[in-house]
Amino acid sequence: MENSLLENLNLIAKTKNLDSSVVTDTLRQALVNAARKYLDLQKNIEAEIDVSTGELSVFLRVTVVEDYPDVDPEMTADEVAAIDEKYMLLDEAHEYNEDATAGDYLEMEIPVANFGRAAIQAAKQMLLQKVRDAEREKIFEDFQDRVGTLVTGQVQQVDRGNILISLGKTEAILPLREQIRKERYRQGDTVRAFIASVSVNVKGPQIVLSRTHPEFLARLFELEVPEIGDGVVSIKGVARDPGFRAKIAVSTKDDRIDPVGACVGMKGNRVQAIVRELSNERIDIIHWSEDTNVYIRRSLSPANIRQITDIGDGRVVVIVADEDLSQAIGRGGQNVRLASKMVGRELDIYGQTEFDALPDDVREGLFKPREGVVTSEPATAGSTQSKFSELESLFTKKPAEEAQEG
């Protein structure tokens, strides 16, 4: 029975890819618990396991005393109990050895067979629980290091919109909020997703996946574009309206490489592979610039930008040609919203005619900092008027002047 128990537990550990020491350490503790239950005694009990033969031995080992030794009064109850377990009072020791005297070291073997089937089964269950806990801990450690990477799995179950995905040795959840809205999944479907987070709850590690995270798009580009994977082209920013539209900014330090062209690929094959993965999500690939004004222009391209004025509190006023206003804003404000996320500014867009028609006090108010907001520039009447005058002069230039600046 002892050989069979150890062999079975080692087989479990092997299939779970756990170290054999987990089995022996846990079995040792399980035998100690079973012996204490059998003796109804909370004393120092030690279990020994011969791995080569599978032999199990359990011993009661205590020092006989007339009274328990003094302890530090600052010790906790658990610390005191741990010390007391190593000692046995003389009267109690006589129940096990009539000749025991104070100071003797009492060692007595407890036959494992005497524990009974129930005690052995309890030890086995404890070991199995420990094996499961160790397996969960290993899964947590493995996947914690993979947060921010891509993973592929199969749909195992759909429960109230949340999708349970099998990743082989464990499961992950793709919550409804992390799904592209127009996608539908069935049991057995293959799904690629981004590992957003890994945490531990009462049921074990919880791996949360996402297909809406901006970094999911970035990882797909790293996968499809070798220049990004090699570090020649870098991703500077990503903004998404999952399933509908996205913007991604790229750059390179190698003047011989066109970062946008590298991402698009021959006949658009690279970006089209990503578009198909994201259920035909439209992707705008932008050449990043450290010049904020240039970056904003490219983010709103192909809209014709007439003027860009940085207010200094994270707001930028953008004037566009009338015919490009709807294009710059996008359906439901989608384009300007994504551009704002990309450049890290709040973009207030106006058509030229619309801006000219605003009352003077309203136009001036556009350039005043909001109450309670600290601006990057001092908010003075002079500086505000200066910004307004500069913007005003743009629309009073003669055509010849505009052509010359061209």
Image (cartoon, rainbow, N blue to C red):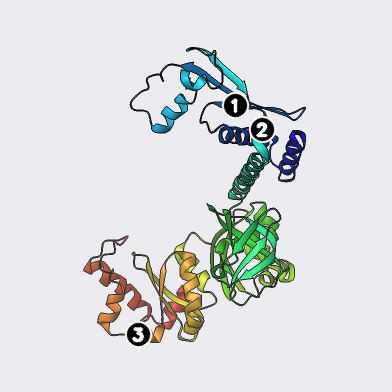
Label 2 neighbourhood size at 10 Å, few (<14), some (14-19), many (20+)?
few
Counting residues from the start of the chain, the first of labels 1 and 3 encountered is 1
Q: Nearer the viewer, mark 1 or mark 2?
A: 2
Q: Position of residue 142 (x, y in %)?
A: 63, 47
Q: Which SS class for mark 2?
A: helix
Residue picked out by circle 3: 356
Asked whether, in this view, residue 144 is left or right of residue 352, the answer is right
Q: In the picture shown, does residue 73 fall above or below 311?
A: above
In the image, what residue occupies the spot 49% across and 66% down?
342
Q: Nearer the viewer, mark 1 or mark 3?
A: 1
Q: Position of residue 266 (x, y in %)?
A: 74, 67
Q: Nearer the viewer, mark 2 or mark 3?
A: 2
Q: Quadrant of the N terminus?
A: top right
Q: In the picture shown, does residue 148 fall above or below 69?
A: below
Asked whether, in this view, residue 232 is left or right of residue 299, the answer is right
Counting residues from the start of the chain, the first of labels 1 and 2 encountered is 1
In the image, what residue occupies the spot 53% across and 14% down?
100
Q: Nearer the viewer, residue 310 or 221?
A: 221
> Distance from label 1 to label 2 (Cα)?
16 Å
Residue picked out by circle 2: 114
Asked whether, in this view, residue 352 is left or right of residue 285, the answer is left
> Distance from label 1 to label 3 (Cα)?
89 Å
Going by the numbered disc 2, the residue's amino acid type is: Asn
Residue picked out by circle 1: 46
> Distance from label 2 to label 3 (Cα)?
97 Å
